[in-house]
Image: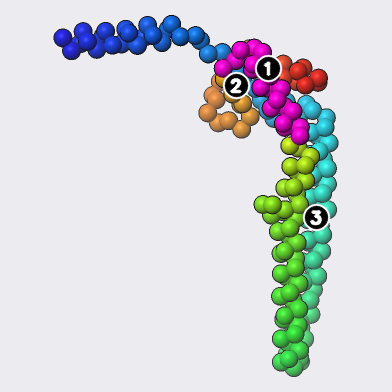
Amino acid sequence: MKTKLLIACFLLTAFLGSTQAQVRIAIIDSDYILNKIPEFQSAQNTLETLSVEWQQEIEVQFAEIEKLYKAYQSEAVLLPEDVKVKRQDEIIQKEKEAKDLQKKRFGTDGDLFKKREELLKPIQDRVYTAIEEFAEEGNYGLVLDRANSSFMMYVNSKMDKSDDILKKLGY
């Protein structure tokens, strides 16, 4: 009796599942799409240039601190206590300024983050809008991004719609 009931439940579930519409799925590769957009590459190059400039600026400050510290160490035995304290405070202050600059440039809400938002977000928004419109027009219920996705072991190339998104964006 129980097995008949279980079989009936299984058949009912299978029947109800098969009567529902199939969900269309599309796969895209956002890295591929973004790397095909010239403005994105230009923005990336600008960010890289700024990052290198700012890193060099910080390294110059730390080199200056290192120089001050070595000078202090070589002269420390000859200096009066009040001069030692003054020089130590100066070195500590310079270190704090360098670390503050590093945080200002590369911190979570730093200049690099803000510049990245300014340059990349509009491009990413355009891509997202194009994906959304593509999904609506093609009646796709699910669009998966295979960029940075470790759970997709295999994707049939027919399902990859990245080039269609690029066409929609005009590339």
Q: Which residues are magenta?
A: 122-141
Counting residues from the start of the chain, the first of labels 1 and 3 encountered is 3
Structural crowding at the residue carrying mark 3, measured as other residues with C-alpha within 10 Å and reported as few (<14), some (14–19) or many (≥20): some
Q: Tag 1: residue type?
A: Phe
Instruction: Judge the density around disc 1: few (<14), some (14-19), many (≥20) Cα neighbours within 10 Å.
Output: some
- Closer to the camera in the image, 169 or 83: 169
162 to 118, vertically: above or below: above
- Residue annotated with mark 3: 54
Q: Tag 2 or tag 1, which sits nearer the N-term?
A: 1
Q: Which mark is residue 118?
A: none
Q: Nearer the viewer, mark 1 or mark 2?
A: 1
Question: Which of the two residues, 62 or 169, is positioned nearer the viewer here?
Answer: 169
**Distance from the alpha carbon under mark 2 to that under mark 3:** 38 Å
Which residue is drawn at the image coordinates 76% and 72% (left, top)?
Answer: 94
Question: 93 and 136: which one is in front?
Answer: 136
Look at the numbered discs 1 and 2 and tell me whether their residues touch, using CB distance below 8 Å: yes
- Kind of element beneath mark 3: helix
Which one is earlier in the sequence, the residue at label 2 or at label 3? 3
Residue 144's image quarter? Answer: top right
| Residue at (43% x, 6% y) in the render | 19
The quarter holding residue 81 reads: bottom right
Give me the C-alpha separation between circle 1 and circle 3: 40 Å
The residue beneath circle 2 is: 143
Q: Which residue is mark 1?
A: 134
